[in-house]
Image: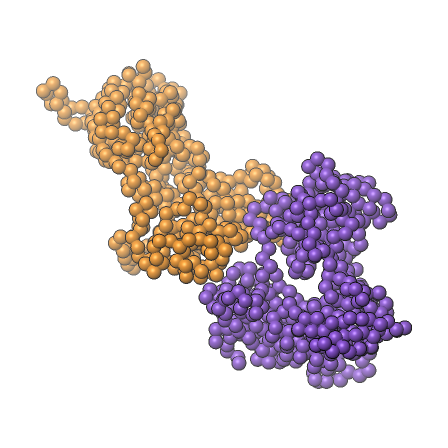
Chain colours: A purple, B orange
Amino acid sequence: MAETSFDLIVVGGGPGGYVAAIRAAQLGLKTAVVEREHMGGICLNWGCIPTKALLRTSEVYGLIKHAEAYGLSVKDVSFDPKKIVERSRKVASQLSNGVSMLMKKNKITVFDGEGKLAGTDGARRKIAVTLKDKSSATLTAKDVILATGARARQLPGLEADGKLVWSYKEAMVPPEFPKSLLVIGSGAIGIEFASFYRTMGAEVTVAEVMDRVLPVEDAEVSAFAKRAFEKQGMKILTSATVSNLKKGANNVTATITVGGKAQEITVDRVISAVGIVGNVENIGLEGTKVKVEKTHIVIDQWGATGEPNVYAIGDVAGPPWLAHKAMHEGVLVVEKIAGVKGVHPMKTENIPGCTYCQPQVASIGLTEAAAKAKGLELKVGKFPFIGNGKAIALGEPEGFIKTIFDARTGELLGAHMIGAEVTELIQGYSVAKTLETTEAELMATVFPHPTLSEMMHESVLAAYGRTLHI
Amino acid sequence: MSINILMPALSPTMTEGKLAKWHVKVGDTVKSGQVVCEIETDKATMEVEAVDEGKVGQILVEEGTEGVKVNAVIAVLLEEGEKEAAKSAAPAAATAPKAEEKPAEKPVAPAPKPAAQPAASSGGARIFASPLAKRIAAEKGIDLAGVKGSGPNGRIVKADVENAKPVAAPVAAPKAAPKPTAPAPAAGQPVFVAPGDSRVPHTSIRKVIARRMLESKQTVPHFYLTVDFEIDALLTARQAVNAVVEKKGAKVSVNDMVIKACARALRDHPECNASWTEEEMIQYGAVDISVAVATDRGLITPIVRNADMKGLAQISNEMKDLASRAKSGKLKLEEFQGGGFTISNLGMFGIRDFGAIINTPQAMILAVGAGEERVVVRKGEMVVRTIMSCTLAVDHRVVDGAMGAQFLQTLKAYIEQPAAMLA
């Protein structure tokens, strides 16, 4: 066994963990990462990245199916599920190797195994590691960051079995594509798979327990998304509870209750996407002062847990469950540990969120309802894709951009988008919110023509009754 | 990791300076101790040496940039193996604000410097605040100059303004009289610039002279004591001294002897070798004499340290060296900062007598006129003597009239009977 003594040990090599390790190495801390499966974590191997690869396939496929609208004739369009999945896996493995290279480049020691808190040695924390070859090691460090992530939540009766009832993991590597599918849960994960399989030709039913799809988004976005999905042929059931899954030989019959009325549907496969739980087990939290609430580690604004020199970041430390939130948290916690001056706690309202369904959804800050609930007087602007030249040229006239301002101060409280490429647009408002711009600076900004981004400008103008192109 | 080279504070009072000249360019390898650039500061041009080794990756402040804030990143050194594209810590925020950049916030009465470190120095300097913070401040009537910024690089953000209290003066009254402690604006009569007039930008040194002289005249209660010294004996003594020291290459001037005499007198009157502070009087242990030297860039006052303990030849040699380096702008910081007393001599221009402005925080400055033959009355008869008129400007907070007069009596004794300096 090589080195066992470090300044910082990060348990978990996902986006939060590996980014924290790189930042620590940059700041001169001797750093180790303990990762039980793949560098890059779920995000890179079984989440964000491989699903984006799949969704790119469905996007291209969708375009080809509409080739005629663009003046193209394409005949005999078909696809090979195996190749689609292969491409997705290749993308993931390329990036995972990239992360391993980054660890080497930054002289970060990686332990392939499971790490857990194992008490203290004087002022130093001990981490017991069970390596993949079953050997074990004890590492010590001044500080420890727990970045163990989260996993799919299993609801009783709706447990994923990996065959007929899938979690995200099986849904990503199907041996063949189902002809019919029930997706339970319409959060980002559920709706992305629903969108993918629908475009690839499956009959898709989405059951959402809340009264609307994408329930964390602005209500107008949810309503627009529901209509768009239904137009694509998806069946959307809101305020719906799935109570029973009867498994057949190669299908599942589910009982879905909507408004007190139960109905049965039979599908090839079920995807259970009913949220996530934090990975708080087997990491040595028992008997420590690390507090766990609702499967997540409780932290303060600097990522500190109840235990001295033990920090937590990312999914295991609570919502929003987003890779970029984990990365940002990792950086700020490490900088705080290293004594960097001018570190600021993260502002949740400045974290953007993206969903890569078709049409795409992106948002930042408060929804209109949440802003109203705060008792603020609002200026709300909305601009539709149909009013944007680039959107028309792309053949993507569906969607809108909505902005919400505090009428008193001009603060951009929130922005909500649905439509083509909005996941690439939202960062403009993230910068604006982080810089604390008001409507005045956004109005004074020159947006390039012809781009979809012009709608970001128009939406702001619309909030103040000054929109130009509608 | 890359190393940021920061704008150094070459004096405790320095807040900004001019980056006069770069000695290195991007791609150069520098060694620790190597001169990388010259900075024109409060009083002189100073050379800045590299502390670390490395390769110059980026130069962020161009030669000739004025008003570069202390601690701003001026260049980035790369360590071995680093790519030049490596990002510097904060280049954008490090560049000095350009002169044209006017503060964007609404005009407010100049505020006294708050005890807490403001986000940016007040008094016309740009205040860094987010647009939202500015909007909220304007609405709440908060003067941003008094708000401490918690954002990146001390930028004032929404949360800072929300926690700040409005100032008493309404923002709507921008023409409120400046507070008495604030330095008065240079305004007054407007300056009309006609065709053929030229605009000469201020040098750092000119700005410092302007600021310090204004501050001294406005805040120090000056009074003046004029006295005539008969210097025939001093001139005779000078000849005798020079006859000896010239063999060693030294040549003592009248001014060198005045330095020595003042130093001895100050040793005898420690209450005059002092500075006023609000809490207490600071009496200096050493007798350090600042001597005003005119240079092309402006006035500078290098210091003859422990002048009371030094011989005339040594004082003379030191003075020549200091004056020559003052003229080329190569004085070290410690050679012109400090001092307990200043001598300003305009005798070589035939000035008979003048009143000087005290070089704060010192309490006295002696203005030395020309030594000239004058008809004087001695024992009822008109005789010709070489007379040198001097006027002592005194800070009345430190030294009262009688004390100043007694100091001059002692000084007169040393100058008129130079042998006493040997005692």
Residue at the image point whose x is 21% and y is 28% from the top: B227
Is residue B349 placed above or below A176 in the rendered structure? above
Q: Is residue A459 left or right of residue A176?
A: left
> Quick check: B227 left or right of B96?
left
**Residue lying farthest to the left in this orientation:** B380
Q: Residue at x 33, y 33 (%)?
A: B276
Q: Say whether residue B38 is left or right of residue B301.
A: right
Q: Can you name the residue that lies furthest to the top here?
A: B423
How far across and down, in percent of the image, does residue A158 sit? 79, 67
| x, y percent for residue B383 | 13, 22
Q: Residue A136, percent across and down?
A: 83, 43
Q: Nearer the viewer, residue B27 or A177?
A: A177
Residue positioned most to the front: A260
- Figure disc tally: 0
On the image, the x and y values in percent for residue A217 come to 63, 69
For this rendering, which residue is in front, B243 or B393?
B393
Side of A106 where A401 appears, left or right: left
